[in-house]
Amino acid sequence: MTHSQNLNQKPQALSALVKWMLFGGGIALTTILFFVIGAGKGRPEWGTYWIIKPLILTPLVGAFGGALAYRITKLGLNRILTIVIGVVGFLIVLWIGIVLGLNGTMWD
C-alpha cells in the first residue's frame, strides 16, 4: 500500500515545485524586463541581439531560485524562519542571475 501512496504524492509535490519555479521565473522575467526596456537601443558594440542573453538566462536562474525557495520551505523548521530564509535565498539567486544576464551587455 505504501508504494501506491508514494506514487500519488509525487505528482502533487512536482506540481507545487513547478508552480514555485514558474513564480520565480516570472519575477525574474519582470525584473530583467525593467532593466532591458529602460536601456534603450544600447551600444553598437553589444550587437543587435544583446537583449536575448538576459531575457533567457535571468528567468532560468529565477526558476532555480524558486525551486531553492520551495526546498527550503519544506525543511520542517519554523514556518516564519523558513519563509525568511527562502525569500533571502531567492533574492540572492535573482541578483546573481541579473548580474550574469547583463554581464558583457550593460555591464562590462
Image (cartoon, rainbow, N blue to C red):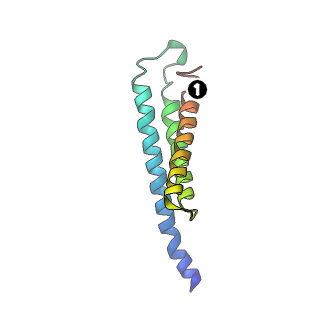
Count the numbered circles shown.
1
Which of the 4 quarters of the picture holds residue 39?
top left
Q: Residue at x 50, y 48 (%)?
A: 87
Q: Residue at x 51, y 65 (%)?
A: 13
Q: Secondary structure at mark 1?
A: loop
Whole-percent x, y for residue 26 in the image: 43, 44
Q: Amino acid at mark 1?
A: Asn
Vertical relation: 27 (above or below) 43: below
Whole-percent x, y for residue 100 in the image: 58, 32
Quadrant assignment for the N terminus: bottom right
Whole-percent x, y for residue 99 in the image: 56, 30
| Viewer-closest of 89 and 12 | 89
Q: Residue at x 44, y 56 (%)?
A: 19
Vertical relation: 99 (above or below) 86: above
Whole-percent x, y for residue 31 in the image: 43, 35
Vertical relation: 35 (above or below) 30: above
Q: Residue at x 50, y 13 (%)?
A: 44
Q: Residue beneath label 1, please? A: 103
Vertical relation: 13 (above or below) 54: below
Q: Residue furthest bottom?
A: 1
Quadrant assignment for the C terminus: top right
